[in-house]
Amino acid sequence: MLFHGLSAFPITPCDAAGRVDTGALSTLLKRIDTAGADSIGLLGSTGSYMYLSRAEKRRAIDAAAVCLGGRTPVIVGVGALRTDEAVALARDAQDAGAQGLLMAPVSYTPLSDDEVFEHFSTVAAATPLPLCIYNNPGTTHFSISQTLLSRLSAIDTIAAVKNPALPAADIAAAHHETVSAVPAGFAVGYSGDWLVADAILAGGVTWYSVVAGILPAPSVKLMRAAQTGDRAEVERINTLFEPLWTLFRELSSYRVVHAIANLLELSPFDPPRPMLPLSQADRTRITAALGVLAAV
């Protein structure tokens, strides 16, 4: 049941030199744990995994293990350009006490299906930890087809997929097609916060959430409403989230959650360069969106 429910993905607070602030990270993790999320997605895209050294990633995982004490399972992102690097990151995660792995097929030179299959199968064989396929074509420019997903899902330790959610009109058919391509019990979950409620209502078992990493309490309420099929409550809460979703779509969720961490005094750090912090005007809009969410 690891890849089920609400998986909250926090930022990884770090200074301009890429040094992780384990105190600030622990503060974020404690908020998620207290709110009752089902797992924590550490070092995902929101967690800046592509901007951190292997040593800093290990420091982050070690800090999470100490902070959480096993209360909330930790799924660690281990994506890397090279297969041997991804294997090393997977073993680091296992050694540090992670409960699961998440990996996207990141690349510079475009990859073929066979190359991605060999990449995943090699990493999956490196540890006994269950692995979730991170299908993130918007970032990696590689889309995992249903045929490739079916091949990958036959590997013993590959247990889940994190797909981008689709609009409400399309998600039910797409979810049925995905479930039909994988074995029974394979966990099909979704990301894309502003679309995920409908994906859960359509049968998705996991919400891999950016917003839950910084605002876990209202995110838990939205997820529980979706899990119980309470469409009226989903609509009510989602309407309160909509000003924030608008900012996510316009400015990117990555930039917005860093700004929220600043505004809530949870982290003093900006996103890693070359990304620039959001303007004061945008921060004022974010503050207004947070005020609307107080009604959740």
Image (cartoon, rainbow, N blue to C red):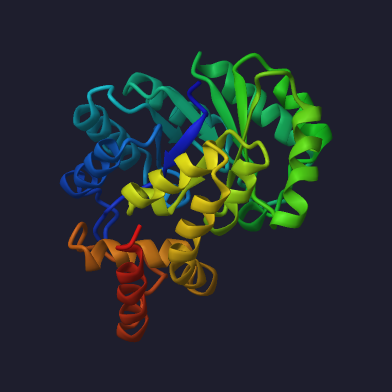
Image point 37% across, 72% down: which residue?
A: 289
Q: 93 or 291: which is nearer to us?
A: 291
**Compared with residue 201, is residue 280 higher up or lower down, i.e. above or below?**
below
Picture quarter containing residue 155?
top right
Determine whether, in the image, residue 41 is placed left or right of residue 167: left
The C terminus sits in image quarter:
bottom left
Q: Residue furthest right?
A: 147
Q: Is residue 289 visible?
A: yes
Q: Is residue 163 visible?
A: no
Image point 69% across, 58% down: which residue?
A: 167
Picture quarter containing residue 122?
top right
Determine whether, in the image, residue 200 is placed left or right of residue 31: right
Q: How many marks?
A: 0
Q: 66 or 54: which is nearer to us?
A: 66
What is the x, y in percent for residue 14?
26, 54
**Compared with residue 11, is residue 185 higher up or lower down, i.e. above or below?**
above
Q: Residue furthest bottom?
A: 281
Picture quarter containing residue 163?
top right
What is the x, y in percent for residue 67?
20, 32
What is the x, y in percent for residue 194?
55, 59
Determine whether, in the image, residue 48 is placed left or right of residue 65: right
Image point 51% across, 29% down: which residue?
A: 4
Q: 27 or 107: which is nearer to us?
A: 27
**Compared with residue 61, is residue 31 higher up or lower down, i.e. above or below?**
below
What is the x, y in percent for residue 209?
47, 47
